[in-house]
Amino acid sequence: MSRADDLVGERAAVALIMAPRNQSEDAELLFIKRAERVGDPWSGHVAFPGGRHEPGDATMLDTAVRETREEVGLDLSARATTIGRLEDLPAIAKGRSTGLVITPIIFALDSDDVALRPNEEVATTLWVPIGQLARFEGAGTMTYRHEGKDLELPCLRLGEHVLWGLTYRMVTLLLEALAR
């Protein structure tokens, strides 16, 4: 298996945005639920804000900042500190590589006073306490039908929403990084 740095393909970036909360509560992580859209392999999924790298983006950091501004109206360049990044991950849809490589970039907001304005690509936004994720509250499996077979995949149930797939993998990598 190749190292993440050796992955080739079209590029995308996502923003893992942590917001501070008062001292008695956990920091929270921002998720979006993607709008239902024909032709979108991740339609309706819980995800992080982000998208494809465009020619005007100098870096993957620029891609994550631009996409977050477009999708939820949050200017990370003015409101957040870049903490680091996780390893690049290949995007998989319906059990197959899409040829897309995703760079997850971690941000910390300077305050929790944030007004989000989702665009048409986003059905809703969710703030989830990182402690809840770290305790794997709502952990279970979900059935995914692939090529005529039912697969049981790990997931986290976040109220009415289900976190699974590539976003679930990014969350586990973030939790491992935070535990170090």
Image (cartoon, rainbow, N blue to C red):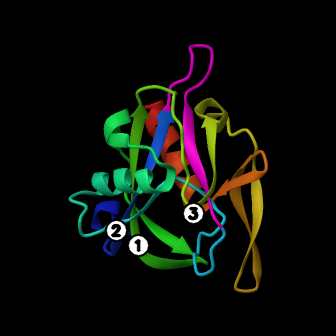
Tell me residue 21's x, y (percent). 56, 22
Depicted 104 relative to depicted 144: above or below = above
Q: Which mark is residue 120?
A: 3
Residue sitting at x 48%, y 47%:
173
Distance of label 2 from label 3 (alpha carbons): 22 Å
Tell me residue 105's x, y (percent).
Answer: 38, 48
Q: Compute the Cα span from label 1 to label 3.
A: 22 Å
Residue tagged 2: 11
Which residue is located at x 52 percent, y 72 percent? 92
Question: Residue 5 at x, y = what percent?
Answer: 29, 61
Helix, strand or loop status at disc 1: strand
Would you name the residue on which mark 1 appears? 100
Q: Amino acid at mark 3?
A: Glu
Give the residue furthest to the top.
23
Instruction: Give, as a single range, the part of the protein colored magenta.
Output: 19-35
2 vs 3, front mark? 3
Which residue type carries mark 1?
Answer: Leu
Q: Earlier in the sequence, mark 2 or mark 3?
A: 2
**Residue at the image position 52 percent from the left and 39 percent from the top:** 175
